[in-house]
Amino acid sequence: MSTSTAEPSGAPAHRYTAALANEIERRWQDRWAYEGTFEAPNPSGLLHEGWEEKGEGRPKLFVMDMFPYPSGSGLHVGHPLGYIGTDVFSRFKRMTGHNVLHTLGYDAFGLPAEEYARQTGTHPRTTTEANIANMRRQLRALGLGHDPRRSVATTDPQYYRWTQWIFLRLFESWYDAEADRARPIGELVDAFASGERTPQHPDTGDDVNWADLSATDQRRVLEDHRLAYVSEAPVNWCPALGTVLANEEVTADGRSDRGNHPVFRRPMKQWMLRITAYADRLLADLDLIDWTDAIKTMQRNWIGRSEGARISFDVLGGPGIEVFTTRPDTVFGATYMVLAPEHPLVDELTADVWPEGTDDRWTSGHPTPTAAVEAYRAAAAQKTDLDRQADAKVKTGVFTGSYATVPTTGKQIPVFIADYVLMGYGTGAIMAVPGQDQRDWDFAEAFGLEIIRTVQPTADFDGEAFLGDGPAINSGFLDGLGVDDAKRAIIDWLAAEGHGEGTVTYKLRDWLFSRQRYWGEPFPIVYGDDDLPRAVPDDALPVTLPEIDDWAPRELDENAEPEPPLGRADAWVTVELDLGDGPQTYRRELNTMPQWAGSCWYYLRYLDPTNEDRMVDPAVEAYWMGSDAHSGGVDLYVGGVEHAVLHLLYARFWHKALFDLGHVTTPEPFQRLYNQGYILATAYTDQRGVYVPAEEVVEGDDGPTFEGRRVSAEFGKMGKSLKNSVTPDEIYDDYGADTLRLYEMSMGPLDRDRPWETRAIVGSHKLLQRVWRTVVDEDSGAVRVVDEPADDETRRILHRTIDGVRADMDGLRFNTAIAKLTELNNHVTRVYADSPTPREVAEALALMLAPLAPHTGEELWARLGHEGSLAYVDFPTADPSLLVEDLVELPVQVNGKVRGRVSVAADADEAAIVAAALEDPGVAKHLDGGEPRKTIVVPGRMVNLVV
């Protein structure tokens, strides 16, 4: 479908057309770049130039968009929605006297970039740099007022040098629970050496003197405390991609979201970050920041703080089992136990033969417990955690052949493994109380296990597991107590008898931080003969990626060990370093960091991107991140709700660690968070349910068709997967960038989803044409403005518009600001159709339009005789005296029904309003000469006369 806006022949020579818009836009973009219009000065350092003019004495404002990934397909018109919004807000704030930092970088490492490179057969650096160049071009054409000096890319070695530096700060730190903050690892060494703290032997766990440990064992002790550490953990292993995947990179069907390959759960040694140490602070500090309740709730649920108790169950002939439960009061109702299939005790607890009398339902048809457990574990490994948490009625599991002892009763209960228990929550083991948990009830019924209620259900309860409150029953010394009292009593008993203690646990797990890929930040870590990790010195950073041709991961067997591509860089793998013991040869870490690493801290590098000596200068960080608000941080952060948990949680964690170590001055990175909506568009599927290119669909009387065949229409988020993208380049060519900006901001509130309709964009283009005609004569190109004052009505409308637009701009209500400007321009067009526009109106209109349509605003401002950009010109301010209504019209009711209307002075008193109402002919008719016995006046709203 063509969207051409070509003007008919004979059209005025100076009409605002797509061709004129494109010429104006390119010219102003070049000028902004040449003059450095949007370069925000720092209070010190290399970016200090312009401080006296643009910075000193002005309040600062740090506005930021979420880090974009430079896709190979470039931008579609849905991508810039948030970027336009932040640009409008930033431009408005510059004009209200702020020093605004607004820039954009590129999150360019990671699996998507590597997979795209593999598909095209091109090195990922080549494709990534080309994608960034294309995206820069598209964004520049949009007229975004970014400071280009501050733009970064995570793939730039001078950027990821500091990503590596931050990782080393985590590696060289530990969390002091007593002080509730991270501290340098050297302070822990000093505490061990002085006897202030007592270390535990890395093998036995016994208390030991620090000096009695060997150097290797001392290092092993420290590994158990570091914020960045190596651990064996269950991971999502994708052999087809040759790497582990984060949970968010695995579909609900247990396959990779890239390539749809099978994913298996298996234990593997990986780098971990101890985010769990910050769980309570990540929860508590949500109260400090201006985020929506919905986003805060998502973070709270992800962290999943639970209060309860740890209870130890003895096992005959085997190791004890520790469980965490939020309902320790129900321990008397435990009738079996369940371990996650990956639990480290499974092997030790699996018997050689089935105990006499074992129920056939418990064996899954296998001749021995060993065979049953092996088969079940293999099946469970092919499921994702999401699958395993699904609330399915059909429960599966197998008996291990072992029995545990209930500590309160001495009763022997069977120990199963089942995939509805996850290793990533609690201890990976549960005491099953079917009377009080529906999942346990379903399992008990499936396997013929006993059900004991421990809480008296209400009289009207007729269900299965009872989840409500009530007095304890079948619970010995707890009988009769309410749930809360019973919890306190059993926790005291467990502690006194040595069977457990009250504790807190979290759903949040430590952050899996390794990827077996090439396209990522190398770890600044090496290994010596003891196979323990050592930090690369800061002066050896960055550890750069080796240039290798064979960088693509190889498809592996399910049980194969990972083959990180960096292992193929033979000359890179080994390095000679002096780490304090003289020059020695070390092996480099072969895994790379995940894509999240570079996006955790990019906002800090925006502040001081040319600094080669520090991540950020302290004075610069304090200036831009400081705030009168509770936590400081970025003043406005705009992005999609899809990043509500992982990116934001990871960034908060890194920032808090840096705060503890004195590298930043604020406890939170992002003070205000705003989630923009999505642009939706029609998508089409053929008879197979396969999406077809929306731009090739023909709309006919009989419905839409593609290549002559009927297709079905649906509505969805614009994107490559639905094949319903519209590129901004098309809109630039047919209308100009200002029209695109105005259309996207007028479609609805910025935080709501909105439908895209290419045919509707012409309305925004016509609005710009009408504004243009208010100032410029279409035939001659001359300015049609006079210095004479506007009439009183126009002036009042102008100042009410100024007042409303200012408020809307501050509140990110750009759609209503556009509506107000439209009303003002319509009035001016009507009143001054045959005469020039008063300058006071034309100039105010150009200035108010400028944040929304900056090229057009700049051009009109220049044609009105002003030199230089309007970027720092004061935004119009309303005259308060002109905001007061001279007259107001009030409906007049007689006995509750409107019988007339009167116009009175806005400040008229009640007596004057009643007098005017009585004189209205319609009102007088219904009074029929009588006097009202009661008058009710609601100022500014209505008059009611009761007769």
Image (cartoon, rainbow, N blue to C red):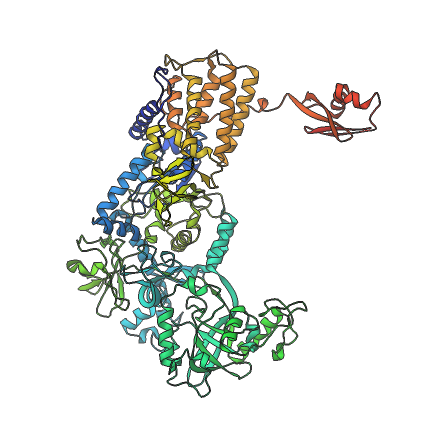
- Tell me: 521 left or right of 785: left
Of 288 and 200, nearer the camera is: 288
Question: Is residue 831 shown above or below 672?
Answer: above
Q: Quadrant of the N terminus?
A: top left
Q: Where residue 311 sits in the image (x, y, percent)?
A: 50, 75
> Toward which corner of the image does residue 45 lie, by quadrant?
top left
Q: Where residue 553 sits in the image (x, y, percent)?
A: 23, 58
Of 488 and 858, nearer the camera is: 858
Q: Where residue 750 sits in the image (x, y, percent)?
A: 47, 39
- Tell me: 449 left or right of 5: right
> Toward which corner of the image does residue 494 lie, by quadrant?
bottom right
Q: Where residue 707 sits in the image (x, y, percent)?
A: 32, 40
Of 444 and 551, nearer the camera is: 444
Q: Is residue 739 visible?
A: yes
Q: Quadrant of the C terminus?
A: top right
Question: Is residue 381 shown above or below 723?
Answer: below
Residue occupying image coordinates x 36% and y 78%: 204
